[in-house]
Image (cartoon, rainbow, N blue to C red):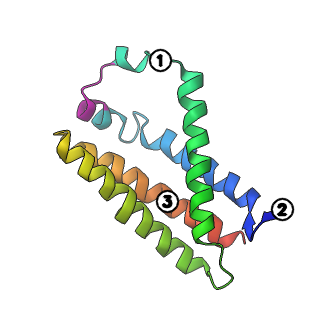
Amino acid sequence: MTATGINLWAVLAAALANFLIGGMWYSPALFGKIWMRANGFGEEDLRRGSPAVIFGVSFLFCIVMAANLAAFLSGPETTFSFAVAAAVAAGLGWAAMGLGVVALFERRPWSYLLVNGGYLAVSFAAMGAILGAWR
């Protein structure tokens, strides 16, 4: 199933990969505790809000990111290696650096930028690999 050269199944798979990487990335097994300290969060902060809304809207945002990246990679000349390189450049060069600017003005610690920017770079690389491979 394609729309203007974009494989919609690949977009959904890339969005799911982004979402699952986030789940692992921010878990206590990886960077969850560092992320909590960087944000000044305690366990009670994580219990606030609606998990259904937070996870549901987050997944919708993942779909938008994957679809946007797919649009940039939809040309017939796009190779797997170009897709991964372009996705890393977008994740690190745009998303993480944009987050970095915000973090500086919000006076966030460097750990905030490293954890969140790292997630963006890694998840964009995974999305690029999926979108580049599944054309």
Q: Earlier in the sequence, mark 2 or mark 1?
A: 2
Q: Residue furthest front?
A: 4
Give the image location of residue 61, x and y in percent: 56, 43
Image: magenta residue range: 36-42
Which residue in the protein does label 3 denote? 124
Q: Are marks 3 and 1 in contact (CB under 8 Å)?
A: no
| Left or right: 17, with 37 as reference point | right
Quadrant in which the N terminus appears: bottom right
Compared to residue 41, the image places residue 114 above or below, namely below
Kind of element beneath mark 3 = helix
How far apart marks 3 and 1 lie (CA) works out to 27 Å
Query: Could you tell me which quadrant the C terminus lies in?
Result: bottom right
Residue drawn at x 56%, y 74% is 83
Left or right: residue 26 versus residue 9 is left
The three-letter code of the residue at mark 3 reads Phe
- Of 35 and 6, nearer the camera is 6
Q: Which mark is residue 12?
A: none
Name the residue located 57 percent from the left edge and 70 percent from the top edge.
Answer: 72
**Whole-Å distance between the Cαs marked 2 and 3?**
22 Å
Is residue 37 within the magenta segment?
Answer: yes
Q: Cα distance, mark 2 to mark 1?
A: 36 Å
Q: Position of residue 117 (x, y in %)?
A: 34, 52
Image coordinates of residue 20 in percent, x first then y, are: 56, 44
Q: Residues within 10 Å of mark 2 (few under 14, many from 20)?
A: few
**Residue receiving disc 2:** 1
Name the disc covering residue 49, or none. Answer: 1
